[in-house]
Image (spheres, rainbow, N blue to C red):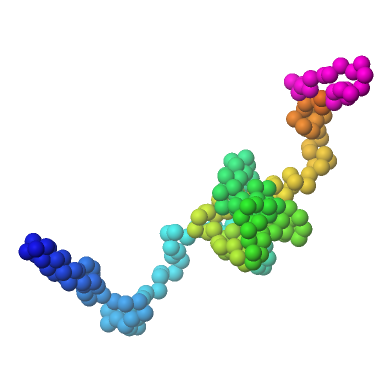
């Protein structure tokens, strides 16, 4: 009993000793508060104005079109302001399937398990008008700033990654509505060598087993 009482007393003293001031001594040291007054500067303000031309190191530097998706007139840009290549598209697909496909679907048609359970507003089908006809700068702004119920992804994706997602989305829109005429002339011949269905010929149906004289044929898939 004596030992238990001693332990209880020690625990109580330890609890009383762990005040916020003892845990964080920095709270008790002299310091200036934001927007507070200061006698160190002639204007009496503690917060200082950054020197002209400086930017936070976390902020990217680039043209208005690149950073915001808007031109000088404030309209969404109509072309992607960085070089397009396979690496950018692959990166865009990777990030689209991580951050976008859960709601918008793997092909951007708005069909996903998450979307089917959204009660307030389901994600739109980005493959059809009017969404498919909007300029690329619009999509960049949505990714950068958010839109409606969609949160911004500027913290998760840097500038190049955002444009990569936009490029991949545009590729999805083109691919889902493409025709043979959209294929370059020098590559159309390859479509004839690889017909729909992976280039395999359709296997004929076996004769009706109920027909007299008909031999049953085992259905096989031709190599």
User: Image quarter for residue 8?
Assistant: bottom left
Decide which of 55, 219 is in the foreground and name it.
219
User: Image quarter for residue 69?
Assistant: bottom right
Decide which of 150, 217 is in the foreground and name it.
217
Question: Picture coordinates of residue 114 (x, y %)?
Answer: 61, 55
Placement of 36 over or under 177, stated as above or below: below
Residue at the limit of the structure toward the left, as seen here: 2
Placement of 151 over or under 192, stated as above or below: below
Question: Picture coordinates of residue 43 (x, y %)?
Answer: 35, 83
Residue at coordinates 61% horizontally, 45% vertically from top-left?
Answer: 93
User: Image quarter for residue 143?
Assistant: bottom right
Please name the predominant secondary structure of the magenta segment in the image. loop
Whether residue 44 appears in magenta in the rendering, the answer is no
Give, as a single range, the part of the protein colored magenta. Answer: 204-223
Residue at coordinates 74% horizontally, 56% vertically from top-left?
Answer: 132
Placement of 198 over or under 119, stated as above or below: above
């Amino acid at each position: 009993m004596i030992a238990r009482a001693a332990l209880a007393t020690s625990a109580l003293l330890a609890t009383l000793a762990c005040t916020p001031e003892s845990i964080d001594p920095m709270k008790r040291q002299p310091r200036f508060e934001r927007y507070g007054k200061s006698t160190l500067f002639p204007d009496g303000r503690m917060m200082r104005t950054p020197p002209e031309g400086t930017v936070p190191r976390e902020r990217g530097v680039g043209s208005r079109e690149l950073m915001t998706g808007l031109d000088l007139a404030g309209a969404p840009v109509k072309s992607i302001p960085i070089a397009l290549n396979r690496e950018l598209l692959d990166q865009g697909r990777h990030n689209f399937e991580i951050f976008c496909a859960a709601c918008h679907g793997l092909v951007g048609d708005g069909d996903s398990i998450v979307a089917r359970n959204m009660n307030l507003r389901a994600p739109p089908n980005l493959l059809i008008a009017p969404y498919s006809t909007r300029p690329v700068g619009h999509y960049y702004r949505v990714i950068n700033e958010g839109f409606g119920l969609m949160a911004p992804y500027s913290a998760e994706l840097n500038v190049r990654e955002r444009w990569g997602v936009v490029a991949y989305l545009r590729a999805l829109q083109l691919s889902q509505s493409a025709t043979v005429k959209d294929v370059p002339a020098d590559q159309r011949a390859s479509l004839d060598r690889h017909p729909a269905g992976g280039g395999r010929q359709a296997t004929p149906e076996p004769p009706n087993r109920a027909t007299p004289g008909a031999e049953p044929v085992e259905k096989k898939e031709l190599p």
